[in-house]
Amino acid sequence: MKNRLLALLLALTALLLSACGGEDDPSRTVYAMDTVMNLTVYGEGGETVLSEAESLLHELESTLSRRVEDSAVAALNRDGSVDHALVADLLAEAVRVAAATDGAFYPALAQVIDLWGFGTDALRVPSQEELSPLLEALEESAFSIAGDTVTLIGEADLDLGGIAKGCAGDLLCKLAREKGVESAVFDLGGDVAVLGTKPDGSAWRIAVKDPADAAQYLGVLTLTDAFVTTSGIYERYFEENGVRYHHILDPNTGKSAESGLVSVTVVCESGVWADALSTACFVLGANEARSLREDLADTLAFELILVTEDGRVLYTEGLADTFAPAEEGNYTYEVIS
Ligand code: AMP
Ligand code: MG
């Protein structure tokens, strides 16, 4: 047992080193968007990129977080309309995801999230009487986007929590590329963007967390140029009378999604889509997530790792060579189409 634990610890250390770089690598820890982020940028100009990346993350937080008092999204929710190019672009993308997922991803859940208290210390289970009017408001909500002007139609407020980190990942990679960087890894609190290869030319190794124990992992992805995002029940939750309530909400019920899944990892070239799709596929469940992947195949390729509540790890065939299941653990693994 001791030896097994030691081997696991060593394996984990090696993994962290390979994902975050070594001690002397140019890296920085940033706290933004409610998350501890680790950025590592290799090559000439790495330090400059890190400084600009840090500023960019703070700027994104003060634009996209509805809880930052004078953010563009807070202004939109308060005034019903705002002029902001990034918010307009990101919302347009969010609306595309909402349409593609039949509303499983829906970027206007702010009041429903607040009713549960997610993101605050005041967590509680709301009554159906409280939820129903908010669900009606959701039904009637819409967005108008004209140039850089975004207008909310109806009572529901915008919440970009399910897509903002993906947007950050895309913008960090864009920034690094523009500065001539060919090798970087941006770990945005578990959602990871990797640029190019490691400096030695090998692929990055990214651990996928075990939703039952986030200090353990289910397997390792070996990738170059990709975004990996995970939506899981372990991220934000509380328990009451033995029931776990987590932060991924089904827009149809206003309650924690119960789709038979406990975690969804998406691998995709686009950070925004990876982030939004992990949330959406969690709500949809395994079968609908697989159909969605088929439906989108011609427009946007993405791969999935789905963990079911009965202990199965289903991963799509595109990951057959890149995902290595953990050697120990309680899961069974299956390649799916
Ligand atoms: P993620 O961890 O990326 O799945 O994002 C979860 C966050 O997205 C939550 O904390 C909410 O802010 C928001 N959210 C929850 N459920 C949904 C949903 N069905 N569609 C869009 N955003 C959601
Ligand atoms: Mg997401």
Image (spheres, helix red, strand yellow):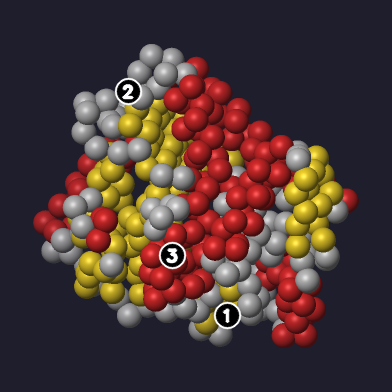
* Residue 49 coordinates in the image, percent (x, y): 49, 22
Image quadrant where residue 199 sits: top left
Above/below status of 81 relative to 45: below
Label 2 lies in ligand 1 vicinity (Cβ under 8 Å)? no
Find disc 2 in the rendering and name its residue: 24
* Residue 70 coordinates in the image, percent (x, y): 80, 41
Mark yes or no: residue 71 visible: no
Find disc 1 in the rendering and name its residue: 240
| Spatial CA span between label 3 and label 2 | 45 Å
Which residue appears at 44% of the width and 60% of the height?
A: 296
* Residue 241 coordinates in the image, percent (x, y): 56, 85
Q: Earlier in the sequence, mark 3 or mark 1?
A: 1
Q: Is residue 72 left or right of residue 214?
A: right
How many neighbours does mark 3 have within 10 angstroms: few (below 14), some (14-19), or many (20 or more)? few
| Spatial CA span between label 2 and label 1 | 45 Å
Q: Secondary structure at mark 1?
A: strand
Q: Earlier in the sequence, mark 3 or mark 2?
A: 2
Q: Is residue 54 left or right of residue 17?
A: right
Find disc 3 in the rendering and name its residue: 295
**Amino acid under label 3?**
Asp
